[in-house]
Amino acid sequence: MTREEELRLVRAVQRGSTEAFEQLYTENERRVYALALRMCGNEQDAMDAAQEAFLKAYRAIGSFRGESAFSTWLYRLTANAATDLLRKRRTGRIVSLEELQEREEGFDPPAAAPTPEEEAEEQETRRELNEALQQLNEDSRRILLLREIGGLSYEELSRELQLEVGTVKSRLNRARARLCTLMKRDGNKRRDSASKDGERR
C-alpha cells in the first residue's frame, strides 16, 4: 500500500468510515504483531500490545496529520504500548529476530528451503542475537527496533524520542556496537566451551 493510499483511507476513517479502518488494520496487522512480539517476548503480551496500539490509533486518528506514513505512526504506537506493558509486567524478554536489518516488507519466507547446515547456523545466529538483545538496556533495544524493524527515519526517531538527530545517530551507533560486542563475546564463549568439551572427550 502506498503512502497516498494510506492517507486516503485515513481521511475516510476521519470521516467516520469503519470499513476504511478495517482495511488499514488488515494491511498492518501482521507487521504490528511482529514488532510487538519482538519487543514483548511472548504471544499473549504481543497480542495485548498490538490490540492496544490499534485502539490508540483508532481513538487518535483524528489528530493524524500525515506528517509521517500511517504505518510509521502505528509502529510508534506499538512500540509505546509494548514498552508500557513490559514496564507494568516487569518482563523484558525479546524473542529471536530473523535479521536485525529486516524491514517491514521482509517477513516473507525464502524462496528455497535452507539446507540442514544452513538452518542450524541460522538458528545459532538467532539465538546469539536474541541473547545479546536481552542484555541491552531498554532504551537501546527500543531505538534499535524502531529503526531496524519499524523503519523510522532519524528525523522520526528524533521527534519520537525527543532527541536531537545527532544524539539519535550517536545512540544508534552505540547500541549497534554494544550488540555486536555482546554477540561476539557470547559466540566466543560458546566456541571455547565446545572446544573444551571436545578435548575432554
Image: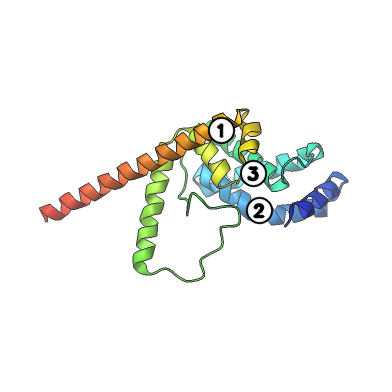
Residue on which disc 1 sits: 168
Instruction: Measuring from the top left, give residue 153's x and y in whole percent.
Output: 62, 41
The mark lying in front, picked from 2 and 1, is 1
Identify the residue shown where x is 60% and y is 28%: 164
Q: Earlier in the sequence, mark 2 or mark 3?
A: 2
Q: Quadrant of residue 74?
A: top right
Picture quadrant of residue 135: top left
Q: Amino acid at mark 2?
A: Glu
Q: Residue at x 21, y 52 (%)?
A: 194
**The N terminus - image quarter:** bottom right
Q: CA distance from mark 1 to mark 3?
A: 17 Å
* N-term mark: 2 or 1: 2
Q: Can you see residue 134? A: no
Numbered mark located on residue 75 in the image? 3
Q: Amino acid at mark 3?
A: Tyr
The CA span between labels 2 and 3 is 11 Å
Query: What residue is disc 2 on?
Result: 29
**N-term-proximal mark, 1 vs 3:** 3
Q: Residues within 10 Å of mark 1 (few under 14, many from 20)?
A: many
Label 3, secondary structure: give it.
helix
Q: Residue at x 60, y 46 (%)?
A: 151
- Toward the front, the furthest residue is 166
User: Which amino acid does the dot numbered 1 rest on?
Assistant: Val
